[in-house]
Amino acid sequence: MYYIRDVSESPSPGLFGDEPASGNYVVLARKYRPRTFEDLIGQEAMVRTIANSFALNRIPHATMLTGVRGVGKTTTARLLARALNYKSADQDGPSVQLDPPGEHCQAIMESRHPDVFEMDAASRTGINDIREILESVRYAPVMARYKVYIIDEVHMLSTQAFNGLLKTLEEPPPHVKFIFATTEIRKVPVTVLSRCQRFDLKRIDSERLAAHLANICAKEGVAVEADGLALITRAAEGSARDGLSLLDQALVQKPGAAVTAGDVRDMLGLADRGRVLDLFEAIAKGDAKAAIAEARAQYDSGADPALILRDLLEIGHEAARAQALGAEARLIGGADWVGRVRALAAQLSPAQLSRLWQMLLKALEEAGKAPDPIAAVEMAMVRLCAAQKLPPPEDAARLLRDGGAWSAHAPPASTSGAGQNATVNAAPPAAAPAAHGISHGLQTFEDVTRLVAAERMVELEIALDRMKVTHFSPAGELVFVASADQPRDLVRTLKALLEEHTELEWRIRTANETPAPVESIADRRKREEARKLEELKRQPFVAEAMRHFPNAEIARVTNPVDENAGGGDVVALPQSEKAAPAPTRKKEADR
């Protein structure tokens, strides 16, 4: 929540006793505290619920306000106390319309009303403090409609104090209302929570908080660049009080002159956003030298190592949002910044962004523990750049399935990833003849498997590799033998993919009968490998070699590799074979 009303516009005395003595300055967080429910921005659902409960006369006897620091829990509690006891010439009953102020409003705002009690549980945690409340609840209010007890940071109460409250919370006198506020809702016993109506005060979204800070600057007659306000908003993390406190600090950076984004950045100890984006782009390219140099340069300029990593995390998050939401993603920043982030979103694959995010989180944890944080950052740059040269997770899963090896000499298999200079070398599939009258490219079931591979749908690709197809028609029909290990949503997922790419309505079903044995693509591949192996064994030079090495066996048949061209199939022996002792090590024959 944040605040839009200037005290100077109202002739009434200060807010909650915040009116300064002559010549004293009041910080913005106190000066712009809300005076009515209309001043609460971002808590519309809570205000609507309270208004409806008043209108229906269904007012809870206990209310729990929870949320992070600075969202207005205490302020809301005081507004609620005023609303419960509101009385004016036109209204004599609970109301969320607090303008004009009622008979009791000013005294409640200044914390001097005899029927509204405020207690800070952080300093008064014991059962004796609660006993004072329990003894006073029996008496009727002196002036107002209700006795209201506001207990701030209620989670700090001791177990005995909570137990002492339970009976009164269960059956309170009709003239008593309790309002609790806490930042640690999980520390409040469930026996207390179950007796309260709970409101979770929301963090303020960045755009609304930035707009509010700009409004405050206009009222104060000062100028702060929009990018500077965005930096303050980001540092406030949804807290109005933190945002106003940081704005107070920023306004004294350049008395009488406009405050720039650079001033705010220096005040917060942040690295330049553009330079952090340069660093992220170097990581995406796998350029460890440039990444380490840039990280060290930012550190030498005064940037905190942990904040460098946090900024990198923010860029990764923004790129992921831009990738997932497309044009609907709202990115805060200048046109150049937004354009570069969207370019990263197009350049990197979802798997790469996810991997970078996880590695940056780990690096942030290490930087907090390392004796030299910048060293931890530089080591993180090495790991991040090295990871960009590895295959994407979906390709790695495919390699594990096929038993292939990763080659660093061939061009990328796809353009969805950035910083990849490696791919699996595979012979291009032979083109299938087009079926009569069918214009799309899925003429055979093998075409379907290639489409799934191109879409990087790894789980579906593995399932199709094992699928035993009894009938396939490019006109929109596929029949297969059901298997116990196939994915549950196999048919639905495959049907949606095929209909998207062919604009046909596909019929995919399981076969009722299988009169003859049916091979899957994996079965056919194994049979072909066995045939090649048998053919090779019949070659005279191979038979002669096997005669001289009776304990050897042929591991695999592969095509020759042209090292100059970088083509052909690359085959790696399993680790168990590489580690085998020399006398029993398997021999691989190429033809």
Image (spheres, helix red, strand yellow):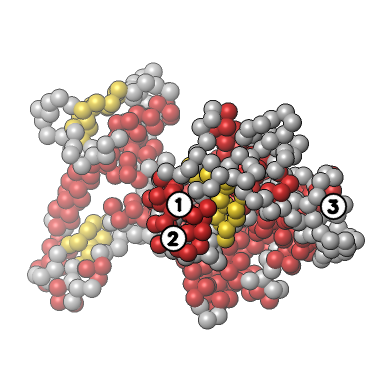
Which quarter of the picture shows residue 288? bottom right
Is 488 left or right of 254, judged from the image as shown?
Answer: left
Q: Which of marks 3 and 1 is in front?
A: 3
Q: Residue at x 11, y 30 (%)?
A: 516
Label tally: 3
Disc 2 marks which amino acid?
A: Ala
Q: Residue at x 67, y 58 (%)?
A: 242
Number of the label disc, if any, that sits on residue 161: 2
The residue singled out by tag 1 in the image is 351
**Along the polypeptide, which appears first: circle 1 or circle 2?**
2
Q: Horizontal and vertical percent for residue 289?
A: 59, 71
Residue in front for this viewpoint, 290 or 432: 290
Vertical relation: 589 (above or below) 333: below
The residue singled out by tag 3 in the image is 220
Residue in front for this viewpoint, 363 or 32: 32
Badge 3: how crowded within 10 Å, few (<14), some, or many (20+)?
few
Mark 2: secondary structure: helix
